[in-house]
Image (tube, rainbow, N blue to C red):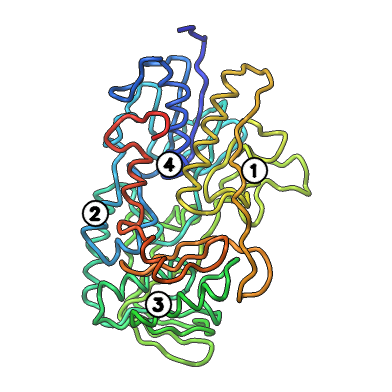
Amino acid sequence: MHLVNSPIRIAIAGGNYGGLGALKSLYLNLLATNPDYDGSKQAPPNPNVKITLIDRRDGFVHYLGMTRGLSQPDYARKLWVPYTEMPWLQHPSITIKKDIISRITPTHVELVNSSEHVEFDYLVVAMGQSRNAPIGVAASTRSEYLQAMEKYFSVISDAQTIAVVGAGAVGTELAADLKTDYPDKEVILIHSRELPIPGPFMDEFRHEAVRVLHKLGVKTMFGQRVVDESAAQEDFSLEHVKHANILPELIDSVKRNATLVTSTGAKVHADLVFNCLGTKNKSPLIHLPSSSSDAPIFSSSGIRINSHMQIDDSKYPHIFAVGDISNRAAVAKYAGAAVKSGNVAGSNIAKLIRAKGEHVELGNMGKRRGGGRGGSGGGGVYSTMKLVLGEHNMVIQSEDGVIPPEMAAKMSSPDIKLSKALKDMAIGKFPTQGR
C-alpha cells in the first residue's frame, strides 16, 4: 500500500441512518478493498484514511419505532444499539467522538465539550432534524435511555386520560400505538386542522387515517388549536438544558396533570400530554457562507444539495449533506432514504479521493418514481407514505393512490422495520457490498 505523508481526513457529523449509511459506504469503498475481503473479519488497516464519526450518542437509535417503544417496553429496549456492537466501527481508521456539535465551518467541526476542532478534507453532515423528547430522545447513552423509558412506562401506565397534541405522522402514530396497547385508557388526539397529516397527501389518505383512529377508539378533536395549558412539567431530560438551544431534543414535551384549552373554548383534562408539534432544523450550527446572497446554504426545508448529495454551492464540493437535514425533494424524509443518501455520499467521497483531482462521474441519489396522481384531495402531485397505526393497521398512500385497507394490512412490518435497520447498519458483523 502506498503511504501518504498525511491521511485523508473525513468527518461525519451525526450518526444514525444517514451518518452510518455514509460511514458504511466509506468502509466498503476505502477500507475493505482487498480482493479477499469477504466480511468474515475486520478490513485491513489503511493509514491513508482517517474517518471521524461525531455523535452525542453512544449508539444507533431506530427512531421509526419510538412511538411503539413508548407503548411496548420490550420493543423499546431493542431500539438502541451501542456502537460497541458494530465490530466494523472498531477499525483503526475509524474514530468515534462522543460530543455535541456546536458549529460547522468550511474546514472544521467545533464541539461543546472540547477545545479541539475536528479538521476535515471531506465532511458529511448527517444531523437530522430535532424533535422534543421523548420522540427526539434526550439520552446520550443506552443506560440513560433505558432509565428514561422506564419513567415513561410508569407515567403512561398510571395515566387514565392521555392527550396527544399535533396530528402529523408522529402524533397520529403515537395516539394509535397508545390506544392499541392500552385500550382501556382514553386517548385524545388534538390538531389545529380539520384533517391529520399535513403535507402533499390526498384527503382520501387522511380520511382513511381518521377512520382507523376511530376504529381503535381514539377520540379526535380536529380544527382546534391548543391556546392555553396549565400543567406540572415533568422533566425527563438527562442532559443539562443549557444545550437546548442547539438540541431541542433535550427538552421534554411530556406534561402531567394538564388542563388544555382549545381555540373553540373546549377544555381537556389529561393525566398525561404528549406534544408532537413538528421538527426544528439545525441551521444555527451551520456556518457556511453562501456564494450568493440569493441562494443561502440553508433553505426553509434544509441544506440545499445537488443529486450527488453535495452542498449546492461551488464553494463546497467537499461537503455533503444526507438524510433529513437536506432539502432535496428527491430525498423523502424517511429512514430508508437517509441510509441511501448516506451510501451515495460515502461512495462519491471515495470516488473523489481516488480521482486525485481529476474529473470523475459521481453517483446520483436518483429521483423518486413519478409523483402520484391527483385524487379526492384535488389535483396536483402527491408524496408517498406508510402510516403505521398500531400493530395491525397501516394506511398507505402510493404513487397511484391510497392502498385498500385489506391490502395495506398485508404490507405492514410487525417490527416497524427494526430488523431491516439492524441489517443495514451491519449490527454484530462486518459489512459487505450489497448487504
Q: Quadrant of the C terminus?
A: top left
- The amino acid pointed to by label 1 is Ile
Local crowd at mark 4 within 10 Å, few (<14), some, or many (≥20)? many
Tell me the distance, in whole angstroms, between the alpha carbons under discs 1 and 4: 19 Å
**What residue is rendered at 38% in x and 64% in y?**
252
Q: Earlier in the sequence, mark 2 or mark 3?
A: 2
- The amino acid pointed to by label 3 is Val
Local crowd at mark 2 within 10 Å, few (<14), some, or many (≥20)? some
Figure quadrant of residue 322: top right
Residue found at the very far bottom of the displayed protein: 265
Tell me the distance, in whole angstroms, between the alpha carbons under discs 2 and 3: 27 Å
In the picture provided, is 326 more to the left or to the right than 411? right
Residue 335 visible? The answer is yes
Q: Secondary structure at mark 1?
A: loop
Q: Earlier in the sequence, mark 1 or mark 4?
A: 4
| Number of the label disc, if any, that sits on residue 212 | 3
Figure quadrant of residue 94: top left
Q: Position of residue 111 (x, y in %)?
A: 47, 39
Name the one closer to the observer, 24 or 95. 24
Tell me the distance, in whole angstroms, between the alpha carbons under discs 4 and 2: 19 Å
- The amino acid pointed to by label 4 is Gly
Q: Position of residue 226 (x, y in %)?
A: 49, 81
Label 1: which residue? 305
| Number of the label disc, if any, that sits on residue 15 | 4
**What residue is rendered at 30% in x and 80% in y?**
271
Tell me the distance, in whole angstroms, between the alpha carbons under discs 3 and 4: 34 Å
Label 2: which residue? 77
Name the one closer to the observer, 61 or 121. 61
Residue 269 sits above or below residue 133 on the image: below
